[in-house]
Image (spheres, helix red, strand yellow):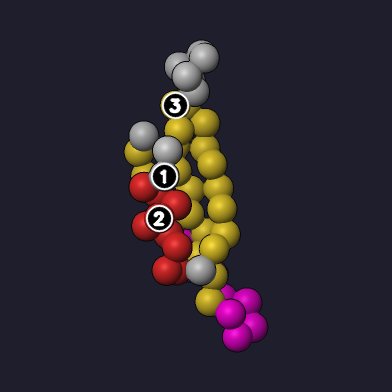
């Protein structure tokens, strides 16, 4: 599993971060990208989770 990128987004008064990680499929072995928009504090937790 590899980290792809983290970009900062700002919407109004909230500060959000879009995190993208690459996940290997157990069935086919192909890689897919999983995207999520969250607060900056939760990025490390998202990237550490399998």
**N-terminal of the two: label 1 or label 3?**
3
Q: Is residue 16 above or below residue 29?
A: below
Say if the magenta span includes residue 32. Answer: no
Residue found at the very far top of the displayed protein: 28
Q: Which residue position holds label 3?
A: 24
| SS state under label 1 | loop
On screen, residue 18 above or below 2: below
Distance from the alpha carbon under mark 2 to that under mark 3: 18 Å
Residue 47 percent across, percent down from the top left: 40, 49
Which residues fall within the magenta stretch? 5-14
Q: Which-is-in-front pick, marks 2 and 3?
A: 2
Where is residue 5? Give x, y as percent.
Answer: 41, 51
One can see residue 25 in this view? yes
- Labelled pair 2, 1 in contact (Cβ < 8 Å): yes
Determine which residue is flagged by label 1. 49
Q: Which residue is mark 2?
A: 45
Task: Tell me if I can see residue 5 in this picture.
Answer: no
Q: At x 52% / y 37%, what residue is drawn?
A: 33
Q: Position of residue 50 (x, y in %)?
A: 42, 38
Front one among 1 and 8: 1
What number is the disc on residue 38? none
* Residue drawn at 42 percent across, 68 percent down: 41
Give the image quarter of residue 40.
bottom left
The alpha-carbon separation of the residues under discs 2 and 1 comes to: 6 Å
Assess whether residue 10 is covered by the magenta stretch: yes
In this rendering, the answer to whether 11 lies above or below 40 is: below
In front: mark 1 or mark 3? 1
Please give left or right for residue 1 compared with residue 17 in the image: left
Question: Depth check: 6 or 49 in front?
Answer: 49
């Amino acid at each position: 599993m590899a980290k792809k990128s983290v970009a900062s987004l700002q919407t109004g008064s909230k500060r959000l971060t879009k995190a993208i990680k690459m996940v290997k499929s157990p069935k086919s072995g192909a890689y897919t990208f999983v995207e999520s928009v969250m607060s900056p504090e939760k990025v490390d937790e998202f990237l550490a989770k399998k």
